[in-house]
Amino acid sequence: NDEFTVGWICALAIELAASEGMLDEIYPARNQPEGDDNVYTLGRIGQHNIVIACLPAGSTGITPAAKGAADMLRSFPSIRFGLMVGIGGGAPSSASKSPDEEDIRLGDVVVSVPDGELGGVIKYDRGKMVAGGQFEHTGMLNMPPAQLRNGVNKLRATYEAQRNGLSRHVTDMIEKTLALREGSNPRFGDLYSHQGWEYDQLFEVSYEHQESAQQPCPYCDTSRLVRRRPRTTTDPVIHHGTIASADMVMRHAATRERLRRQYRILCFEMEAAGLMNDFPCLVIRGICDYSDTHKHKIWQRYAAATAAAYAKDLLSVIP
């Protein structure tokens, strides 16, 4: 197992499917040490030999992520760095004329990079109550390794001058999956593609979902949508900054907005805090909802694909 130098962790089966689809080559399975419960996919992207593991069904969160990473490092001791790749809930700006870096849309990608005193990931449920009943965050998580941060900056410079490669990678992944896998799901292409701007709806912070058996939001008042500048392309935008992590789903717009303003948070998820101090990694999240009561699942597969596409692009610039 010594030739495998990149560890790639997913939390959900849909994330694993997108990640496997980004591999240039898949290798046969190998025996692994006793006591390692992970089921690995081994493969290659460019010159990098990669080992991918997905968390057990029904076991998302910080503790399962930490155990999965520990088992991976024990079975593959030559891993140089890790990637946590999957979906997350966005924390978009509520202003109608927000700067581009805060104009988060569904399918965009958020990458964990240090921002001020924060190392890229914050465990937002760890802290203390102070005067006035205010919650104050305590404790620090490690920032991603320098090699990954250098790769992020190299991609940022490249994307200043040219279109990013995420849409192309997603299209290639879909075409390859449908062509190579016998009996492939005929809906795979539709499920893992951009879902259409008409289904990307950001409602005002104070307006909660009008419950019904149908999704997404057939009875919600469209006059309560936040007005945002139209995008001229479906290419995902890449955002860099702080990702918030905790053992709970964020589904409350007012709390999302408060934390966004307090810590400049771009995204919420449930696994990264279990990795940062013991598994040197970068967290890459495709945005599948807006962390509010209007949360639904139709964007999850596309968001998983854009996150995996960014990971593939990143590895192309790292020696």
Image (cartoon, rainbow, N blue to C red):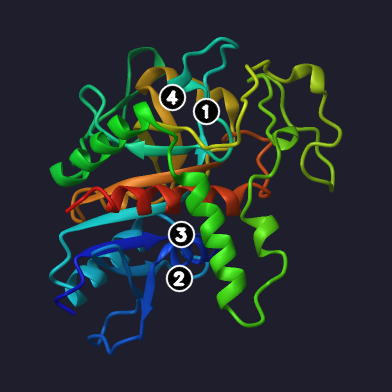
Task: Tell me the residue that label 3 is attached to.
Answer: 60
Badge 4 element:
helix
Q: Amino acid at mark 2?
A: Pro
Q: Nearer the viewer, mark 1 or mark 2?
A: 1
For marks 3 and 4, the one nearer the N-term is: 3
**Disc assigned to residue 56:** 2
Numbered label attached to residue 259? 4
Pick the residue in front: 149 or 251: 149
Q: Mark 1 to mark 2: distance in Å?
A: 30 Å
Q: Are marks 2 and 3 in contact (CB under 8 Å)?
A: no
Q: Amino acid at mark 1?
A: Ile
Residue 176 is situated, as x and y percent measured from the top left of the image, at 54, 67
For residue 233, side relative to residue 281 (left or right): right
Q: Disc 4 versus disc 1: distance between alpha carbons? A: 16 Å
Dot 1: within a 10 Å radius of its alpha carbon, few (fewer than 14), some, or many (20 or more) residues?
many
Snapshot quadrant of residue 211: top right
Secondary structure of the residue carrying numbered label 3: loop
Name the quadrant of the N terminus.
bottom left
Local secondary structure at mark 2? loop
Q: Secondary structure at mark 1?
A: loop
Q: CA distance from mark 3 to mark 4?
A: 22 Å
The numbered mark at residue 236 is none
Q: Residue at x 40, y 44 (%)?
A: 246
| Label 3 Cα neighbours within 10 Å, binned few <14 / some 14-19 / many ≥20 | some
- C-alpha gap between disc 4 and disc 2: 30 Å
For image coordinates 23% across by 42% down, the residue present is 151
Distance of mark 2 from mark 3, alpha carbons?
A: 7 Å
